[in-house]
RNA sequence: GGGCGCGUAGCUCAGCGGAAGAGCACCCGGUUUACACCCGGGCGGUCGGCGGUUCGAACCCGUCCGCGCCCA
């Protein structure tokens, strides 16, 4: 890097003027571009992440902001650590959502997609994508995402489409894709099939209606009947049986006999089936095979007819009743009314709260529907996906959430992949004369005359599942693939575990399987799961609740760094976090603090030394702050390696603000005023800030970049080296252990003790001043004794001044230090507030007495002495001694005050 | 109904076997030559209830209560 003279900083930091320009500079410099050759040549280790592709119609919401912040922290950290980093961005084509957006536009002109025809409509969707799609990509730039824009991908790109066709053909040839007539989830709003995970179950208030079906009687026979209960009474029109449990004595006599289906006047049998729950309701269930998955299975077992009684948009059809043409909900009321009129409604529960499936896109109530669709036979794929985690080839973090993953992959149903849409990858299957079927691979010509292609497209997830390798050029064996697959980590919310992880695992293992050693087949080595972002009261954000926050508004107000830091700080693996604007303000304050601290340091000539600071020649405060820096360096790397972003951020926040700013900078002011200390202090300041800014860069890239380039004159923090303890620790041989002075990142107990004593001394004097109402700015003459080596610094930090002529101590503060009691005699030039001081000392005395009692009790307990480890016993003993000393000291002070009070 | 998780300061959360912590909020004082997006000081908790294990429990076990999520 080229070192130039540090540049002065403005009076205030304004993220708005800095962030956009910095991001532009990073792009121009090409820092985010990944070069596979540096990996293949062995020059660098690879680190790769594929961005779980956001939806092309979507905007950046706060959940993305968290997800991206975490990925960016990892990417920047690894980049600084010398890895070749690929973070690959892109979007999916979101079949239903995108088609709906464009159809809505057409509807404004009173048109439908059918007015344009398939080809023209798809062209219109591409137009929309070009003009209005992908807003999220620009928003990612605002956040600072260090993605490789040169490799941006879209699931409908040519290359990715070839990948889709390739894997479809392979699965088809392996008989892992099949076409069949099954009950699927049908959305009457979107007019397409859905997979299980696109259906959201919710407790809705419906009704449970019990209806009497009369038996068909022989002449002269007693009338008999069976009562069934249903929440969807309109489906009665499609019933083809009533089922009971074979061992249910109540119905043994009627199994095999016929019932008269009300309203339709069709005869249906009573069948016996093991899967009927005798305890539920009356123990008899109506069977509508074309409109209920369980009933479909019963229908198959008993060879029942399966009439479809609903149109695609959920209107009654083909029943030959007056209900034909009615919407399903209208029909529900009408059917019930007619049944009631016939006296067949024997019971009714309204409201009856039960679980109802809704379309995750349109929120319409999903209708189970018998339909001819394409499916993936998931059993072998899902087993492989489970095994990869079971045998550790892919690690789920935090590990507790693996249970959820297994729960899903071990119980997965076959996946419905056909969608009755136009926007998407069209199924590469052609139908010819006489029922001939041909699946066409990517390099094959479609069959010609007399053949037609399947009209459906594939589920968007089908192409998203290929994302970890299709984006890298698969099925071509590219350098990118060789260098960066398997990806290092997939970062996503635990709520998306089923969507991304399970499917990407299945397809990754299947597609890459034949070509690689087993260890290298998985799509990601680690899956790092984070939680949901909630509002400030811990409530889930939702449009209906009106508590959705816009991360971009926060970026405008507080800066991207502040948003990122807030999210990072709250990110504990696998658990949800709450967020509020005020808290983002707190992070903005932290960024300002860093700015001001660096500004102060630069104004005082701080510089980064060529070689590590010589600790032997340093003050205790220098050694303390450097020793703590070593610890923070080690701790931050360790926590990042364990995905503990919240703790890493917290540790840096605490060190930078509470230790460096509140204590070291204040001590540094004193040292800078001493000619023989000033230069050393400038180097320590430079070292500490240089390192802290490096450590913070992955979290808050913008402010750290501005400050670091100003401080060091370096090119960019993006490509600066990640600190190690070897960088910061002095290699000067001091710290052989004899004097307890640390070396090479080891703790420095002497310096720590010195600092703890200083903090104790300063805090006690400040507290006295506050209790006594002494104005903070007022200089108070004082004599400090029993605190050698601390007196001058402590005096500066507590605004004490040397005693002059006529000094008369009006008050004394005693402070327990490691080496004994320090005494500060002050001349407040007036009588002190005895009440306030006595109350203070009484409070401290009470604490000391309680501690003496607590520790005394333990030390008198044979069991404790015998069983507790020596380390603990020693600790208790030390506390006991300390409590005794405190009591003596405080009692003596109180006695003096009593004397003073009596004398005055 | 099955499974998982959570109840710690006003709010959001760390801590998960040896003296109760943080951020934000709140109260008092402050133009201390980096910072009022600040500085200094302070208030605030029978760690959901009850039992058990242990020399010792916010932390381990049981049970109950209250929330949340996923799958039926």
Image: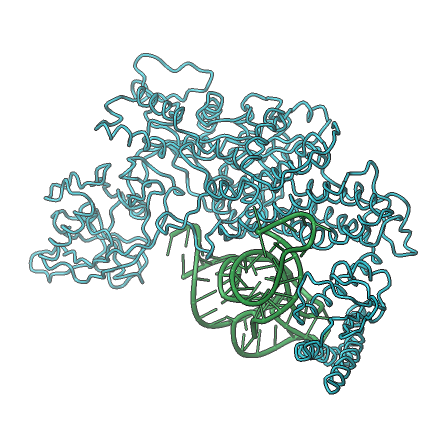
A103 or A625: which is nearer to us? A625
Q: Is residue A785 above or below residue A121?
A: below
The image position of residue A36, as x and y in percent, is 65, 24
Corner quadrant of residue A59: top left
Corner quadrant of residue A423: top left
Q: Is residue B53 left or right of residue A868?
A: left
The image position of residue A790, as x and y in percent, is 82, 61
Q: Is residue A273 above or below residue A170?
A: below
Farthest front residue in view: A806
Q: Quadrant of the N terminus of chain A?
A: top right
A585 or A176: which is nearer to us? A585
Q: Is residue A143 above or below residue A514?
A: below
Q: Is residue A591 left or right of residue A429?
A: right
Name the tint of chain A in the rendering.
cyan
Q: Is residue A9 above or below residue A151?
A: below
A341 or A781: which is nearer to us? A781
The image position of residue A904, as x and y in percent, is 73, 84
Residue at image position (76%, 45%) is: A685
Name the tint of chain B in the rendering.
green
Residue A525 visible, this orientation: no
The image position of residue A297, as x and y in percent, is 32, 45
Residue A752 visible, this orientation: yes
Q: Is residue A438 left or right of residue A719?
A: left
Q: Is residue A261 left or right of residue A283?
A: left
């Amino acid at each position: 890097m080229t070192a130039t003279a540090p540049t002065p900083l403005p009076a205030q930091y304004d993220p708005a003027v800095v962030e956009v320009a910095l991001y532009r500079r990073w792009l121009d410099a090409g820092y985010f571009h990944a070069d596979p050759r540096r990996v293949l040549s062995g020059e660098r280790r690879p680190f790769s992440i594929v961005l779980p592709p956001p939806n092309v119609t979507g905007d950046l919401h706060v959940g993305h902001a968290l997800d991206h912040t975490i990925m960016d922290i990892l990417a920047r950290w690894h980049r600084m650590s010398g890895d070749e980093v690929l973070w690959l961005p892109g979007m999916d084509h979101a079949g239903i959502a995108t088609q709906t957006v464009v159809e809505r536009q057409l509807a404004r002109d009173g048109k439908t997609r059918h007015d344009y025809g398939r080809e023209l409509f798809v062209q219109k969707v591409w137009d929309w994508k070009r003009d209005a799609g992908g807003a999220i990509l620009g928003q990612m730039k605002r956040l600072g995402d260090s993605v490789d824009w040169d490799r941006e991908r879209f699931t409908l790109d040519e290359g990715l489409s070839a990948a889709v066709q390739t894997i479809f053909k392979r699965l088809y040839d392996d008989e892992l894709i099949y076409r069949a007539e099954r009950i699927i989830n049908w959305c009457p709003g979107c007019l397409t099939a859905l997979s299980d995970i696109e259906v959201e179950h919710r407790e809705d208030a419906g009704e449970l209606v019990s209806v009497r079906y009369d038996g068909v009687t022989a002449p002269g026979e007693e009338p008999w009947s069976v009562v069934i209960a249903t929440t969807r009474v309109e489906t009665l029109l499609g019933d083809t049986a009533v089922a009971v449990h074979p061992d249910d004595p109540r119905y043994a006599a009627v199994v095999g006999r016929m019932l008269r289906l009300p309203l339709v006047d069709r005869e249906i049998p009573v069948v016996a089936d093991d899967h009927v729950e005798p305890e539920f309701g009356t123990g008899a269930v109506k069977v509508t095979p074309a409109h209920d998955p369980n009933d479909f299975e019963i229908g198959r077992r008993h060879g029942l007819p399966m009439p479809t009684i609903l149109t695609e948009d959920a209107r009654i059809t083909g029943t030959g009743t007056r209900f034909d043409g009615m919407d399903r909900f209208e029909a529900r009321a009408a059917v019930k009314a007619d049944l009631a009129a016939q006296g067949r409604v024997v019971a009714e529960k309204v409201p009856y709260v039960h679980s109802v499936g809704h379309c995750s896109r349109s929120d319409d109530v999903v209708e189970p529907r018998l339909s001819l669709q394409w499916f993936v036979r998931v059993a072998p794929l899902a087993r492989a996906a489970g095994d990869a985690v079971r045998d550790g080839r892919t690690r789920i973090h935090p590990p507790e959430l693996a249970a959820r993953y297994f729960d899903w992959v071990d119980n997965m149903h076959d996946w419905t992949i056909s969608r009755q849409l136009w926007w998407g990858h069209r199924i590469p299957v052609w139908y010819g004369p006489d029922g001939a079927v041909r699946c066409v691979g990517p390099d094959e010509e479609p069959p010609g005359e007399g053949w037609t292609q399947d009209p459906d497209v594939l589920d968007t997830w089908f192409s998203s599942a290929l994302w970890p390798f299709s984006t890298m050029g698969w099925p071509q064996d590219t350098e990118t693939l060789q260098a960066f697959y398997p990806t290092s980590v997939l970062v996503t919310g635990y709520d998306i575990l089923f969507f991304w992880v399970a499917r990407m695992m299945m397809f990754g293992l299947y597609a890459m399987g034949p070509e690689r050693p087993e260890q290298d087949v998985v799509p990601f080595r680690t899956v790092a799961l984070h939680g949901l972002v909630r509002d400030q009261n811990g409530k889930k954000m939702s449009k209906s609740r009106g508590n959705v926050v816009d991360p971009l508004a926060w970026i405008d107000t507080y800066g991207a760094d502040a948003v990122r830091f807030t999210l990072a700080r709250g990110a504990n693996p696998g658990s949800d976090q709450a967020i509020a604007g005020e808290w983002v303000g707190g992070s903005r304050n932290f960024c300002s603090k860093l700015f001001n601290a660096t500004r102060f340091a630069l104004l005082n000539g701080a510089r980064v030394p060529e070689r590590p600071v010589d600790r032997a020649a340093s003050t205790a405060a220098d050694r303390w702050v450097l020793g703590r820096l070593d610890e923070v360096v080690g701790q931050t790397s360790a926590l990042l390696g364990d995905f503990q972003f919240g703790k890493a951020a917290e540790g840096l926040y605490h060190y930078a603000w509470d230790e460096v700013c509140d204590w070291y900078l204040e001590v540094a002011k004193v040292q800078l005023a001493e000619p023989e200390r000033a230069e050393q202090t400038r180097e320590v300041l430079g070292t500490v800030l240089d390192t802290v800014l490096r450590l913070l860069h992955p979290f808050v890239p913008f402010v750290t970049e501005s400050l670091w380039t100003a401080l060091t004159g370096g090119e960019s923090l993006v490509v600066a080296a990640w600190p190690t303890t070897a960088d910061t620790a002095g290699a000067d041989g001091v710290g052989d252990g004899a004097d307890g002075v640390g070396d090479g990142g080891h703790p420095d107990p002497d310096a720590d003790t010195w600092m703890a004593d200083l903090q104790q001394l300063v805090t006690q004097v400040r507290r006295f001043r506050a209790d006594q109402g002494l104005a903070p700015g007022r200089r108070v003459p004082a004599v400090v004794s029993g605190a050698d080596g601390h007196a001058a610094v402590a005096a500066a930090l507590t605004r004490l001044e040397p005693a002059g002529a006529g000094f008369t101590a009006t008050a004394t503060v005693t402070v327990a230090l490691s080496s004994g009691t320090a005494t500060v005699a002050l001349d407040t030039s007036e009588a002190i507030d005895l009440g306030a001081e006595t109350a203070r000392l009484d409070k401290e005395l009470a604490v000391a007495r309680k501690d003496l009692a607590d520790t005394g009790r333990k030390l008198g307990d044979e069991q404790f002495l015998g069983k507790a480890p020596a380390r603990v016993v020693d600790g208790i003993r030390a506390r006991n001694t300390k409590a005794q000393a405190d009591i003596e000291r405080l009692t003596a002070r109180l006695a003096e005050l009593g004397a003073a009070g009596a004398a005055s």
